[in-house]
């Protein structure tokens, strides 16, 4: 009996396979019957391009550290990020949560290649398999289980089973499961070939009479898992639903690497039992199918026994993605799972390649099993159910069963035409990126997507506002239709084009982690707006009830017109508060000075929150809207205010803007980090793969020399600026960045500094400044400007006063006098700066 409460949704997929960089590209490759393996300049196999390229700053990693990180770990960060975006899961929503990370990884070719090189190029945290999972948890601030799994070829499917167990027992409510494999050591391939595992022609000929081994291939994949009940409640997109899973071991077989047919049968039967299914429920099986002459027959016979296929009226179709992609080893299980998820979602089985004559050792006809040599289309009836097998060469076996989404669960976009209530409703669409250029690129890609999709605008807004990371470069638009949205985004993408398009906000760059000061401004003026008008602004507050409550809180001796005006403005205040926007101060017009204490009390603010207009600074929200002609225009005006706050870094709960259209997340373009970042490579592993790239060896300690493309700091006219120039130079050297890339107000740790680099920085500054500096200096002052103040006040003890006009405005001091340096200090720092030039 099946227990639907234990079903687990696959809501997001990220991947990098030979010939495919996303699920749609993979499906095209599979259904078109293309093979991405064969003879290459690097030998037989399936290889990924640009494995040395990486965008470290996007993930808060310094370029210096990036060269010491196994490119497998870097690939994992990328595909995990893509899985989150594909699943419309904003990373901020998972911060601090008990989300699990489970990674299948087996090889350490890169780390072996670093041995014997410059010691600083080797970092245990860069190449240890355990860190592959831990780095993901660290980067995303996830607090659930975080572990790497190595069971050889079944690693990633075993990792998936462990994640499913964690979700089913209630330990976690989300899991990121990933697998990765890069082939950087030819010696290992030669060893496998000598053992008879490797095909002679670079092709995996699964189920074929010519089967003579597999071909090693590269790739990475990640899936985001959620309990189905939660995914449905949150209206998340669903690729497929996991019904059951199991893992087992061969035990003592004919040899350590010899398959045990009884164990393979048992693991499939255990997964069936776990899913509450019968053998006849299975419509398709994605086999391990490596293309070995003996391994394939053992697997198919064991499968036939487990699923009792010989009694079927129609043969059971099977397939193997290895015929297209090669054997991704530790990532192979997830490659098979992703293929199966696409199969059940599309109800279409792609062909398995390279079958000229069936393997004579497999009695296909008697077993009533058939390899899909051509594409097979399944009818649109009940959800299609598939099994996925993955077997490790040490005997650890895994099997997972999944189904396609039902009509209600399906992630297909709903059109505006089928939901009239979604037409002409103004929507706020927020864009976020890690750079100005990336922001424009995202705007252009989403604009093109919106012009072609039939998804509702409210669903697009939900996905952009809640399903993407809130990065520092921001823009927003307000639009009433897909056409308006597409045109506005095109303008954001190409701002040099002059246009009369309205509703565009930004772009702006914000400082993440800083919360700008917000001020509410009261006018006490009638605008003709009533409670029913304000109801169109938010779905997170009962506006009519709030209107009545606030009116009752006002003093009874207020004249009627003023009471109406303040009720409207207070209700607007409550709407902003419901969106998470809380003011630090109130500004009131002259005629409201008498009533200011009542307003602060009603809003639950301190009595001194009301302030004269010229005494406070911050982002001012005018608590009046209008004049307006209809609810649509009123909502558009309000959304412009919301958008302006959001792009300036105010934390606004954008979910509260939804007003009951039952919006849902959709799948849209994914773009965040740069896939063509700089080259980061060290050591000898895979050196032939990046021969034409700019290869570097990490340096030991903080070298004094600046890189050729690094602009030397200019001599500064005063002490603080000289010290800032020195600190920027030293931080840049520690992180292997240019001086221009060092933002004086950005956290060192957001730029990739860790405790070890912080200690190096401290030692270098002690040498530069000829003084003792506390080991916690870089932690207590984790930006250039804060460290500058720390050093000036608490270490160098600069005391002679300097005029405030000479000191940087961002620099704060605990005293009213701004400290300055002695003549000797100035000359010492100036000499250092000349040497660095």
Image (cartoon, rainbow, N blue to C red):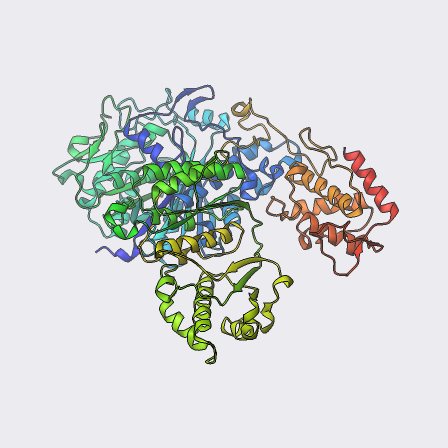
171 in relation to 464, above or below: below
Q: Quadrant of residue 401?
A: top left
Q: Camera-side residue: 801 or 370? A: 801
Q: Quadrant of residue 704?
A: top right
Evaluate whether residue 391 shows in this view: no
Q: Camera-side residue: 644 or 181? A: 644
Side of 795 relative to 677 (left or right): right
Q: Camera-side residue: 300 or 323? A: 323
Side of 799 relative to 741 (left or right): right
Q: Position of residue 378 (x, y in %)?
A: 19, 37
Q: Position of residue 284 (x, y in %)?
A: 23, 39
Side of 463 relative to 209 (left or right): right
Q: Position of residue 407 (x, y in %)?
A: 23, 48
Side of 533 relative to 595 (left or right): left
727 in relation to 548, above or below: above
**Count the marks: how many?**
0
What residue is shown at x 47% (from left), y 77% (from top)? 558
Q: Camera-side residue: 821 or 573? A: 573
What residue is shown at x 51% (from left), y 42% (from top)? 129
600 in relation to 28, above or below: below
Furthest-left residue in this view: 313
642 in relation to 438, above or below: below
Furthest-right residue in this view: 824
Quarter containing the N terminus: bottom left
Evaluate whether residue 572 shows in this view: yes
Quarter containing the C terminus: top right
Q: Position of residue 375 (x, y in %)?
A: 22, 30
């Amino acid at each position: 009996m099946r227990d639907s409460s234990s079903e687990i949704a696959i809501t997001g997929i990220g991947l990098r396979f030979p010939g495919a960089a996303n699920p749609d590209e993979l499906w095209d490759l599979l259904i078109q019957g293309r093979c991405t393996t064969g003879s290459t300049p690097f030998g037989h196999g399936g290889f990924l391009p640009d494995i040395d390229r990486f965008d470290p700053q996007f993930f808060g990693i310094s370029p210096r550290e990036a060269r010491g990180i196994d490119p497998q770990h870097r690939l994992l960060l990328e595909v995990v990020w893509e899985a989150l975006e594909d699943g419309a899961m904003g990373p901020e929503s998972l911060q601090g949560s008990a989300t699990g990370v489970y990674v299948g990884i087996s090889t350490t070719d890169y780390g072996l290649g670093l041995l014997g090189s410059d010691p600083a190029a080797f970092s245990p945290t860069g190449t240890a398999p355990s860190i592959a999972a831990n780095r993901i948890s660290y980067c995303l601030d996830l607090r659930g289980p975080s572990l790497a799994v190595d069971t050889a070829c079944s690693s990633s499917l075993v990792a998936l089973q462990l994640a499913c167990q964690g979700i089913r027992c209630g330990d976690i409510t989300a899991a990121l499961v990933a697998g990765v494999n890069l082939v950087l050591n030819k010696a290992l391939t030669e060893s496998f070939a000598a053992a008879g595992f490797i095909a002679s022609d670079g092709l995996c000929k699964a189920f074929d009479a010519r089967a003579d081994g597999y071909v090693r291939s590269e790739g990475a994949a990640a899936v985001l898992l959620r309990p189905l009940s939660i995914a449905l409640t949150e209206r998340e997109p669903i690729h497929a639903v996991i019904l059951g899973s199991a893992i087992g071991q061969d035990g003592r077989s004919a040899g350590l690497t010899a398959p045990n047919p009884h164990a393979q049968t048992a693991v499939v039967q255990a997964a069936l039992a776990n899913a509450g299914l019968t053998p006849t429920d299975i419509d398709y099986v994605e086999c391990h199918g490596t293309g070995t002459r003996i391994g394939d027959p053992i697997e198919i016979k064991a499968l036939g026994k487990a699923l009792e296929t010989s009694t079927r009226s129609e043969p059971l179709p099977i397939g193997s993605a290895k015929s297209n992609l090669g054997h991704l080893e530790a990532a192979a299980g997830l490659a098979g799972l992703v293929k199966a998820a696409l199969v059940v979602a599309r109800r279409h089985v792609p062909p398995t390649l390279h079958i000229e004559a069936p393997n004579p050792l497999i009695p296909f006809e008697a077993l009533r099993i058939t390899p899909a040599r051509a594409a097979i289309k399944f009818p649109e009836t009940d959800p299609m159910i598939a099994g996925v097998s993955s077997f490790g060469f040490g005997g650890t076996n895994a099997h997972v069963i999944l189904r396609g989404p039902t009509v209600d669960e399906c992630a297909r976009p709903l059109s505006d035409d089928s939901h009239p209530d979604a037409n002409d409703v103004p929507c706020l669409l927020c864009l976020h990126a890690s750079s100005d250029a990336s922001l424009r690129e995202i705007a252009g890609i989403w604009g093109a997507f919106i012009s072609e999709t039939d998804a509702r605008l409210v669903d697009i807004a939900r996905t952009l506002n809640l399903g993407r990371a809130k990065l520092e470069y921001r823009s927003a638009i307000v639009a009433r239709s897909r056409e308006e949205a597409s045109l506005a985004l095109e303008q954001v993408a190409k701002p040099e084009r002059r246009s009369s398009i309205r509703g565009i906000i930004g772009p702006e760059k914000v400082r993440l982690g800083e919360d700008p000061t917000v001020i509410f401004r009261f006018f006490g003026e009638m605008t003709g707006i009533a409670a029913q008008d304000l109801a169109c602004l938010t779905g997170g507050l009962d506006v009519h009830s709030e209107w009545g409550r606030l009116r009752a809180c006002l003093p009874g001796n207020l004249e009627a017109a003023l009471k109406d005006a303040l009720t409207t403005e207070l209700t607007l205040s409550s709407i902003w508060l419901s969106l998470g926007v809380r003011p630090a101060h109130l500004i009131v017009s002259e005629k409201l000075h008498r009533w200011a204490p009542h307003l602060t009390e009603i809003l639950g603010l301190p009595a001194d929150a009301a302030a004269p207009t010229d005494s406070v600074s911050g982002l001012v929200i005018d608590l009046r809207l209008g004049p307006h002609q209809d609810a649509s225009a009123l909502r558009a005006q309000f959304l412009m205010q919301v958008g302006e706050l959001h792009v300036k870094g105010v934390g606004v709960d954008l979910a509260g803007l939804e007003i009951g259209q039952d919006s849902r997340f959709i799948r849209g373009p994914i773009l965040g980090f740069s896939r063509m970042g700089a080259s980061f490579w060290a050591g000898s592993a895979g050196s032939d793969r990046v021969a034409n790239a700019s290869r570097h060896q990490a340096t030991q300690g903080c070298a004094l020399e600046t890189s050729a493309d690094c602009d030397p700091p200019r001599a500064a006219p005063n002490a603080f600026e000289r010290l800032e120039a020195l600190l920027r130079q030293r931080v840049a050297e520690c992180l292997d960045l240019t001086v221009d890339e060092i933002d004086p107000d950005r956290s060192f740790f957001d730029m990739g500094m860790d405790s070890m680099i912080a200690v190096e920085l401290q030692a270098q500054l002690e040498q530069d400044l000829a003084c003792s500096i506390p080991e916690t200096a870089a932690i207590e002052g984790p930006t250039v400007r804060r460290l500058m103040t720390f050093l000036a006040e608490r270490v160098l003890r600069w005391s002679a006063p300097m005029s405030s006009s000479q000191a940087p405005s961002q620099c704060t001091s605990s005293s009213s006098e701004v400290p300055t340096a002695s003549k000797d200090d100035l000359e010492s720092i100036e000499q250092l700066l000349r040497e660095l030039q």
